[in-house]
Structure formats: C-alpha cells, structure tokens
Image: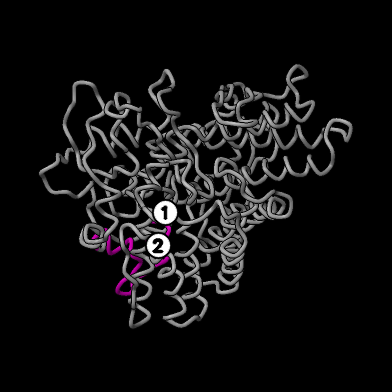
Amino acid sequence: MKKTIYTLIFLSSLFTLSCKNYLDIQPIHNLTDANAIKDQATAKASLGGIYASFQNDEWSGALYAAQASKAGFVRFSVPEYDMSYNQTTISATAWTAYYKSLNAANFAIAGISKLPEAALSTSDKNLLIAEARCLRGWINANLLWNYTHWWADDADPSGLLYRDEVVSLDNIRKARISVGDSYKKIYEDLDFAITNLSDLSSPRYVSKQFAKALKAKLLLYRAGYKGSVPDLQTALVLVNDVISNHPSSFNMEANLSDVYANSWDSKENLFVRYLENDGTRSTKGGYFYTYYLSQIGGNALPLPTGGVATAGLVAGLDWFSTDPRWPVVTGPVRGAETWDNTMRFTFKKLARLGRYAGQIASPPDEKYAAYYFRFPELYIMKAELLARTGASISQSIAPINEMRAKRVTPVLPALNPTNADELMDLIFKELVTETFMENGSEFFASLRFKKNGQPWIVNLKNGKILEENKLCRPIPNSEIVNNPLMEQNPDLK
C-alpha cells in the first residue's frame, strides 16, 4: 500500500515538551499495549503531546504571514497574496502538521475515555477530556478556516476531512463532511469544553474562557461574512460572558511594550504558545522560522533602517504608521545569520531582536510566541458585534474606547465616529492594528468589512476581483492521490 501522509502521522512521534506542570511529561506517541493511557499521569502526558504539536512554524509564523499576505497587507507569501495556489503547487507541510495535531487529540480523547473509575474519577476524566476536546475544536477550526468553504451554507460539501479516531491503515481513506456538519462537530467539542473545563489558570493551556472566545470567533467569521444576525447575537453573549467572568490574572497591560517583552507570560494572553524557550533550540534550527529568520526578520525583507520604514506593508501603511502603536510593534531587527549584520525595519513584536542578536543578548531574548488570543480582541469583537446587531454608534464604539483607555502607554485617544461607515472602518482598522500578524484576524476581517461597497480585501489589492472559491487553500496533492474518497475544493485542482 502506498505510504501516505497519514501513515507518517500515525507512526511519527510527537515533540518533547519543556513547559511546567504536566507539560513536562514525555508525550505518548501511538496507541499500543505498551504505552496505552493507563492512569492520570499518562492521561496528562497525552494532553502534553497535543500542546507539543503546536510548536512549529505551521502553527505560528508561516500561517499568520500567509494570512496577512492573503488579506493584501503584505506579500510575505506571494502565492497566498495572489491566491495562485493549486493542488500540485501547494505544500502539504501545514496540512500534515494540522492532522498530526488532530491525531494527538484523538489519541488523548480515546485513551482517557476508556479509563475506569478506579484509575480516574468521572469528574477528573471529564476535565481532561474537555481539555482534549477544546484542543480538537481549535485544530479543526484552523483546518476549517484554511482548507474548507468555512463561509458557505450548511449544505456545501467542501467541509472538513473530519477524523475523530486515531489514524490507522484501516481508516486512512475517508470522505469530507459538509460545511454545516463541520461546524456542528466543532461546536459539540467546544460546548463540552465550556461545560466541563476549568477557568483560565495559565494562558499556556486552553480554558473555559478560551472555548467561549473561540466559538464566538467561529460564529463571527461566518455570520459576519454572511450577515446572519442570530449567530452574531450568540457570539455577543459569549464575548460578554468572557469579559464579565474571567480571572483577575487575565487583563489588559497598561504598557503595550510589556505585552511583547513578557511574551507568553503577559497577562493579556488567553491562549498563547511559546515557540522557543530562552536559549534552547531544536536541532533543525527552531520552531518559528518565519518570525525570526524569513520574511519577518530575515533576508527576504530587504528594508534596511534608514530606508522607507514600511515593515513590508504594501497596503495600509498610511494608517498603520500614524497609529501610536507603530513605534512599539515595529523597529530595526538584525539579520538572522552570524555574517549578516544588516538591520531591517520590520514587526519587532514578533521578530524580537532577530535570531542571532537574540542568542547573544544577555540575557538571551528568544521569547518568541504565537499569540492565539489576547484580551484586547474581546473588546474589538464586542464593538463589531454590537455594530452588526443594531446598537447605536456610541454604544458600538464604547468597548474599543474602554480598551484604549486601559492602554496607558502609548496613549490611545478615544475614537468618535460620526456615521455607520466611519464606525465600521474604525473597528476594522483597530482590529488589524492591534492584532496584525498574531493570529490571522486581519484576513477574515478583510472579507467581512467593506469599503466603498466592496470587501476591504478588494480595496487592499487595488480592485483585484475576489474569487470566493480561492479564499481557502487547495487540499494537497498527496491527500488527493492517496485518499480516493477525498474531493478537491472547487477551482483549485
């Protein structure tokens, strides 16, 4: 039988972790009699294996540089900017990474679910399963947003290649489910997590609050694009709940510089993944190539200090560069190689000092992180949801002004839109400026917000016609060839 990417997923081992608590435990790799989940310790180790699978470029820099490019703000990934990919040209690297993560989640859920009461109490079992199901919901959300018609009606067949069991040679071949069923499966996982997960204790782990925020995002992205008010109202309830009911340790930082200096330890993080522990790097050169070496801080972005300080932006520079946050989130970053001392002006909040400069700094500065969700986004989401569900202009902008008032350094003046169009423009720009390159929010916002009657993505790309079927990536050729039941996304063969 041909070797497929799924046999690689099944047979390969997961990364070893270096986080605190149960993330320190060596993760389990695949279900056998020798290493099956047998008790609480091995159950927690299986969860550690899921978190470990996120520690790579496809879950951080490569993904978010691609989405920022697709939105039209930068050209860090030209095929994504042009949406010129097809089945044979798209790399399978990200697809494989996401399904490796999914396999780890299904391994944990299956193994923990089988534990008897004598090994793990029902309440403890539900807590651990809820964590694994929240992570599975997060993985499937990313697969949905990147490889399916996430915007479409329920009946659209271009949904997830949904897997809820550990991959084996017996179940590799599988067909896709519909878009509606895809959302249903993800919401089932997140609803279980909302009911059974604990409150946020550390942003390195998923929590009840993250499950609510993620569900709200899923609802907003699709309903905002389609104009479905009931789903927007549901999302607003979830966002309000997180804002009103969260641990005091999760809140705004007064100084924006502290957010990125503290990195994964910032109290603004709801869920964050560290990409490098200070001074330690994998033998392959690191987990976050794009952030420290490639388009963000490396040779592919020839913008030396003293030149035009665009940070690679090809659209939006006029309002990015005049925002008080610009000098905090951008700046000069040294070339990543030992022989390259060129300083480039880029998004320093992600590239930090650059690989080499970060290594030799005292202490080392290698706290690279993927900011999956930060506190300010709650306020911005609330403003948008209010605006889309009939609130007044003053009511809608109020959450953003509350957020801006909490940010003491730099000072962010209150926003005062005078009409509905100006309100939506300000919300869009606030979301992009605050979260750019961190979690992909700018791409989805560029589709549901409009300027001059067209989605912002059309304006950012100078009137380029929007081809809806190309908003998602093609399924990689390796999957199509080796899984006869798999159907390609339309127009992407």
Residue denoted by label 1 = 471
Task: Please give the label number shown on residue 136.
Answer: none
Q: Look at the image and give the residue range highlighted in magenta.
A: 441-462
Where 207 sits versus 407, above or below?
Answer: above
Q: Nearer the viewer, residue 284 or 44?
A: 44
> How far separated are the C-alphas under marks 2 and 1?
9 Å
Judged from the image, the secondary structure of the residue bearing numbered disc 1 is helix
Q: Quadrant for residue 354, please give it.
A: top left
Residue 482: image location, x then y, percent: 55, 31
Q: Quadrant for residue 126, please give it.
A: top right
Asked whether the residues under the numbered discs 2 and 1 touch, taking CB atoms below 8 Å apart as contact, a structural biologist would say yes
- Would residue 405 appear left or right of 30 to someone viewing this image? left
Residue 61 visible: yes
Q: Nearer the viewer, residue 172 or 73?
A: 73
Q: What residue lies at 34% left-to-right and 48% top-to-bottom? A: 257
Q: Quadrant of the N terminus?
A: top right
- Would residue 134 appear left or right of 347 to someone viewing this image? right
**Residue situated furthest left in the rendering:** 306
- Mark 1 residue crowding within 10 angstroms, few (<14) / some (14–19) / many (20+): many
Q: Earlier in the sequence, mark 2 or mark 1?
A: 2
Residue 113: image location, x then y, percent: 79, 37
Residue denoted by label 2 = 447
Q: Quadrant of the C terminus?
A: top left
Q: Nearer the viewer, residue 45 or 88?
A: 45
Residue 154: image location, x then y, percent: 60, 61
- Would residue 272 appear left or right of 484 to someone viewing this image? left
Type of amino acid under label 1 = Leu
Q: What residue lies at 31% left-to-right and 42% top-to-bottom? A: 77
Q: Is residue 445 magenta?
A: yes
Where 484 sits versus 186, above or below?
Answer: above
